[in-house]
Image: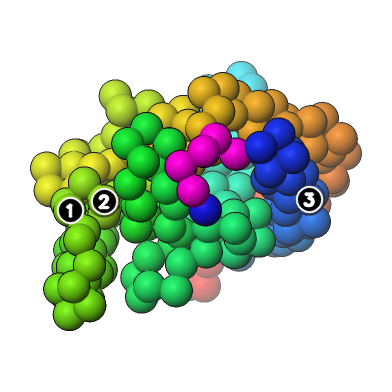
Amino acid sequence: MNERKLTEDELNQIIKKAKTFFKEDIVPSHKANTLKLKKLKQFNLNPFLDKYKASFLTGNDDPESIARALVYPRVLGTSINTIFGDRLQKFCSEVLEGFASTTSGIDIEFIDKMDGRRKYCQIKAGPNTINRDDIETIKGHFQGVKNLARTNKLSISFDDLVVGVFYGTPDDLSNHYKTINKDYPVIVGQEFWYRLTGEIDFYQKLTDAIGDVASEVDGSEMIEEVIKELAKEIEDTLKPKQLES
């Protein structure tokens, strides 16, 4: 790695690997998790709130509407976000393998295309994907790098220890990130990918490429199948039970 902007071929390789990663890792996992939702045990059914949510969504609270109100948030929110977060390290090792770090607690190392200095970077998925406990964990890893640098007589400044957030904007960052940012820079979205690659619009190119993968995936029939199966179980569950006297 050096200070130059990545070549067109290097940029294209990152995009190609990212598309392959999503197509071969994220999409199959998302489909598998979606099919699990046929079973009511995957949810904590709340007859009060889930009937309300069903009516709010569809105008009625029949079993199929309840199923939709349960399935949609999971499929389009929790499930895919969790999958991506869980596979972040794999993304780094496979898609960003050219920046791999051997330093404990550091995900990637790169020459910052804005200031020309080597950055020791912990990667996070998005602007709301850490909790309060993660703050000390992140700072602990960076302290370990500083200790190692002192031992090996390396010159590392606070600005060289960074948190890279794949997507979002500075305004999106949670208070947990803002707390870290008081001590260590948090670079997010377009700026992160620019500092990494030297390509000002690489963030847009990368997200567009992932959009190309998404355009090849149609889960509508699968989701309808899941909803129908789940609705049957909901109907049985909500039937009045004969109480023992």
Quarter-wise, where is residue 39 in the image?
A: bottom right
Count residues near mark 3 (Cα–Cα under 10 Å), then give few for <14, some for 14-19, many for 20+. Answer: some
What percent of the width, then of the height, locates residue 182? 11, 42
Quarter-wise, where is residue 108 in the image?
A: bottom left
| Mark 1 element type | loop
What is the image's colouring?
rainbow
State the extent of the magenta-drawn residues as a range.
2-6
Contact between labelled residues 1 and 2, with CB atoms less than 8 Å apart: yes
Counting residues from the start of the chain, the first of labels 3 and 1 encountered is 3
Amino acid, disc 1: Ser
How many angstroms separate mark 2 from mark 1 (CA)?
5 Å
Give the residue number, with chain letter if any, for mark 1: 157
In front here: 39 or 120? 120
Amino acid, disc 3: Thr
What percent of the width, then of the height, locates residue 236? 70, 56
Mark number displayed over residue 66: none
How many angstroms separate mark 3 from mark 1 (CA)?
36 Å
For the point 60% across and 39% down, which residue is it?
Answer: 6
Q: Main secondary structure of the magenta part?
A: loop
